[in-house]
Amino acid sequence: MQDKKILVVEDDTIISELIMWRLKDLGYTRCSFTSSGEDAIIKAREESPDLILMDITLEGDLDGIDSIKEIKKFMPGVPFVFLSSHIEDEIIERALATRPSGYIAKPFEDFELRMGIEIALMK
């Protein structure tokens, strides 16, 4: 699975660095990163990732949920995992309506990130 391309969309620098470090530690070397929903759509078109790790709350006009909706229009089968500190019912309902491959609550442990990625890539 380590040959899979992973796109990380996270606007918190510390969390994005942690995720990128952890991915490399797990052997995933084909990773890219962006911090906005708008850039995520562009990168997804350009790179055709095998998995997207998407923060829900992003700076800019599009949050992670709306960004995934746009990406699914041209990549309907791409697995994605939401990363979020939100536990509000409304946000969770919006997120679940997109049919994610997973939802990892922040703050998360390395094990949770690893399992979320591996399970999503199995689908």
Image (cartoon, rainbow, N blue to C red):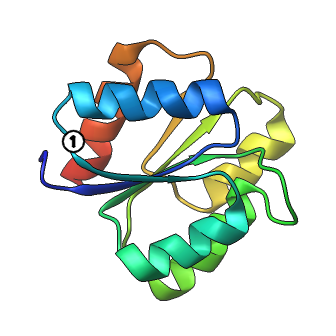
Q: Is residue 27 left or right of residue 10?
A: left
* Picture coordinates of residue 17, whole percent (x, y): 50, 30
Q: Nearer the viewer, residue 14 or 88?
A: 14
Q: Nearer the viewer, residue 81 or 38?
A: 38
**Residue occupying image coordinates x 12% and y 54%:** 3
Is 83 placed above or below 58 here? above
Q: Is residue 31 left or right of residue 35?
A: left
Q: Which residue is mark 1?
A: 28
Q: Could you tell me which secondary element the residue under label 1 belongs to? A: loop
* Picture coordinates of residue 87, whole percent (x, y): 76, 27
Q: Nearer the viewer, residue 75 or 28?
A: 28
**Residue occupying image coordinates x 70% and y 58%:** 36
* Picture coordinates of residue 85, whole percent (x, y): 72, 26
Q: Is residue 7 left or right of residue 31?
A: right
| Residue density around tag 1, few if under 14, some if 14–19, many if 20 or more, within 10 Å | some
* Picture coordinates of residue 58, whole percent (x, y): 77, 49
Residue type at tag 1: Tyr
**Residue occupying image coordinates x 37% and y 27%:** 21
**Residue occupying image coordinates x 23% and y 25%:** 25
